[in-house]
Amino acid sequence: MSVTCTLISDQKKIKTYSYDEYMSLMESYSTHEVTSGNDQSLEKINFTKINLTRMKRWNKTIVLDPQLIILIQNLKDPQCWTVITEAWCGDGAQNIPVLAKIAEVSEGKINFQLVFRDDNPQFMNQYLTNGGKAIPKLIARDTSEKDLFCWGPRPEAAVSIMHNWKVNPMNITKSEIEVTLHAWYAQNKQHDLMLEILNLMAANVAPKNHS
């Protein structure tokens, strides 16, 4: 079983990408030394190259939580998962491969697609985080386009790392805190992300009735 998702924002169809298409774009951006979005700075281009490496690593090493796999494979109704992101987004590179893997093991019950934030400001504005355009942002919908749940831009523990730094930087630079953040991702092995998605799905999705 598979499901097709259509996103409409102010009557304008949004350009979406499959995960394979997104990875191909990441390869192309890195090769041609450009990136997605409005900011084509050298910093963003370099982030894109680093993110491609991160995503390739996750693609090879992700091990999903067994409870999450069971829940996914027993979904009663199909879902559309849309992730708002940009190629230069470090949190996107860390989390998107896991979300894509979850969709993959659903055997077609979760249609996974990605959209670019800067290309779709009206859509992004529907899913702000504390008034900001934080990404990545996952929106899970049913086939009637009703929102089931949203997640993002990062697991709660990672949110705390960044929040605590902003409240009290203690002479730690942005580059240094980003090193700490990505070290946390590597150590956590995406356990927190998987648990948060598991809890969101369990709270909003009715499992199959096997009786």
Image (cartoon, helix red, strand yellow):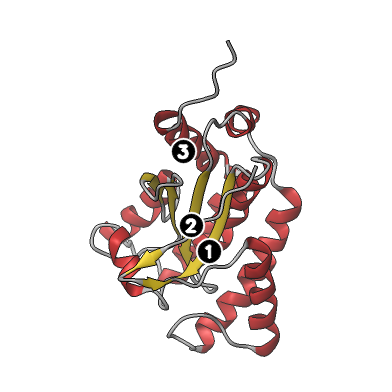
Q: Which residue is mark 1?
A: 114
Tell me which label, 2 or 3, sits earlier in the chain: 2
The spot of residue 71 in percent (x, y) is 57, 29
From the viewer's side, name the closer residue of 43 and 205: 205
Residue 128 appears in view: no
Residue 7 appears in view: yes
Question: Marks 1/2: CA distance?
Answer: 5 Å
Horizontal side of 163 relative to 42 (left or right) equals: left
Amino acid type of disc 1?
Leu
The spot of residue 136 in percent (x, y) is 45, 60
Q: Give the mark toward the camera: 2 or 3.
A: 2
Answer yes or no: do the residues labelled 1 and 2 have beta carbons within 8 Å?
Answer: yes
Local secondary structure at mark 1:
strand
Q: For the view shown, which residue lies furthest in the top direction?
A: 211
From the viewer's side, name the closer residue of 56 and 75: 75
Horizontal side of 6 relative to 188 (left or right) equals: left
Amino acid type of disc 3?
Glu
Image disc number at residue 196 = 3
Tell me which label, 1 or 2, sits earlier in the chain: 2
Residue at (44% x, 48% y) in the render: 140
Residue at (61% x, 44% y) in the render: 102
Local secondary structure at mark 2:
strand
Can you say whether 104 is above or below 191 in the image? below
Task: Report crowding for label 1: few under 14, some 14 to 19, many 20 or more residues within 10 A (C-alpha).
Answer: many
Amino acid type of disc 2?
Thr
Q: Which residue is mark 2?
A: 82
Question: Marks 1/3: CA distance?
Answer: 20 Å
Image disc number at residue 55 = none
Quadrant for the C terminus in the image: top right
Residue at (71% x, 55% y) in the render: 59
From the viewer's side, name the closer residue of 80 and 31: 80
Task: Report crowding for label 2: few under 14, some 14 to 19, many 20 or more residues within 10 A (C-alpha).
Answer: many
